Amino acid sequence: MPVQRLNGTDIYYEIHGEGPAVVFIPGVAVSHGMWAPQVAAFQKSHQVITYDVRGTGRSGKMSWSTRIEDHARDLASLLRFLKIKEAAVCGVSFGGVIAQRFALNYPRLCRALILVDTFSELKPRDREEASLWLMTWLASPMFLLPKPWLTSMLMDFYEPWPDAQQVLRAEVPKIRGLDAVKTRWMIRKVDFTRSLAQIQCPCLGIVGGESELAIRMMKRLIKAIPDASLQVVPDSFDPTSLCRCEEFNGLLTDFFHRIGWQAGMDVEPLYPNAGFTHKIERRRNPEGVRTYEWERKRVR
C-alpha cells in the first residue's frame, strides 16, 4: 500500500472498493487499522479511504509545532492527489477534531460529516469538565509505557466490548508514544464551537451512552452545527465504532441513504432530501439538539 509525500510529510493511505468516497479518520495514537470493521462493511458500496494521520502508523512524525490545520491540510492534499472531488468524512475522538477543521477549511471537499465520540472545545465550563481536562494531561505519559503494560490496561478497560479489545490489541504495538504525547499537547487549544455554524453539509453525531460527560460535549458540538442530528448508542464508549460496531455501521448506512451518498443512488442533489421523502418529524429535545425520524422512500 502506498506512502505519498503530501504537505511536507509522508502520508500512508489505503483505498478499498468503488463508489461514493468515504474517509475514516482514526483517534489519537492509533492507526488506520482501527477502521477495519468499517472497511469490511462499506467497501462493497463505497470507495473507502483510510489513512494514518501524522504521528501514527507509517505516516510522518509530529512536531511540537504541528497544528490541527496541518492535519486538515494533509487530508485535503490526499483527496486532491487521489482526484476525489468530495467525500463523506468520518472521524472518531481526535479524528473528529480533524474532521471539524477539515469541514470548516475545505467545505467543497466535504460532502458530509460524521463526528463520533469527539468534542469541539476543551475549555472547561464546570468542575466535571475541568476534571476531565486535568485527567487528559495527567494520562498523557501513559503512551510512553511499555506496550505490554498499555495493552493490559486497555484490555481490562474494554472487557465489556470484545470487538474493541480485538482491534485495539493489534493497534497498541503500533503506537508511537512521543508522537501521541505531542498530539495531546496540540489539542489543548481546540476551540471550534463558535465557528461550527459555518458548516453547511449534512452532519451526523454519534456518541456512546456510557459517559454523560461525553454526551454533554457532543450535544454542545452538534447544537452548534446547522441541521445536525445526534444519536446516542447505549452501552457504548469511545470508540463507538468498535464498541458497538453493528449499531454504528447501521447508523452510517441510514445516514448515507438519506443524503443519497450510496452506490447506485442519485448523489447529485444536496442536503436535506437528496432524492428521498424522509422527514416524518423534526423537533428539538430539551437540550436544543435536533432529532429526526426517517422514512426511507425513494422519490420517483
Image (tube, helix red, strand yellow):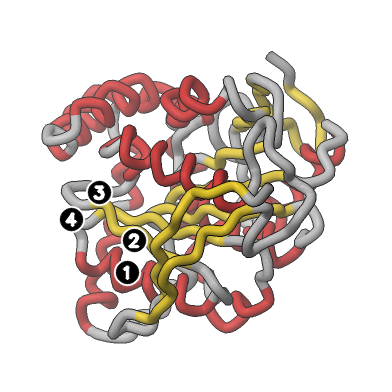
SS of the residue under disc 4: loop
Q: Nearer the viewer, residue 63 or 128?
A: 128
The alpha-carbon separation of the residues under discs 3 and 4 comes to 6 Å
SS of the residue under disc 1: helix
The alpha-carbon separation of the residues under discs 2 and 1 comes to 7 Å
Question: Which quadrant is the N terminus positioned in?
Answer: top right
The reply to whether dot 2 and dot 1 touch (C-beta < 8 Å) is yes
Pointer 2 residue:
137
The alpha-carbon separation of the residues under discs 4 and 2 comes to 22 Å
Work out which residue is located at the far top of the displayed protein and give it: 1
Mark closest to the chain's N terminus, 2 or 3:
2
Question: Residue 124: x and y, percent?
Answer: 35, 80
In the image, residue 26 sits, relative to residue 127, either above or below, namely above
Q: At 76% across and 62% down in the image, what residue appears?
A: 107
- For label 2, the crowd category at 10 Å Cα-Cα, with few meaning under 14, some 14 to 19 and many 20 or more, is some
Pointer 1 residue:
133
Mark closest to the chain's N terminus, 4 or 2:
2
Pointer 4 residue:
210
The reply to whether dot 3 and dot 4 touch (C-beta < 8 Å) is yes
Q: Nearer the viewer, residue 125 or 89?
A: 89
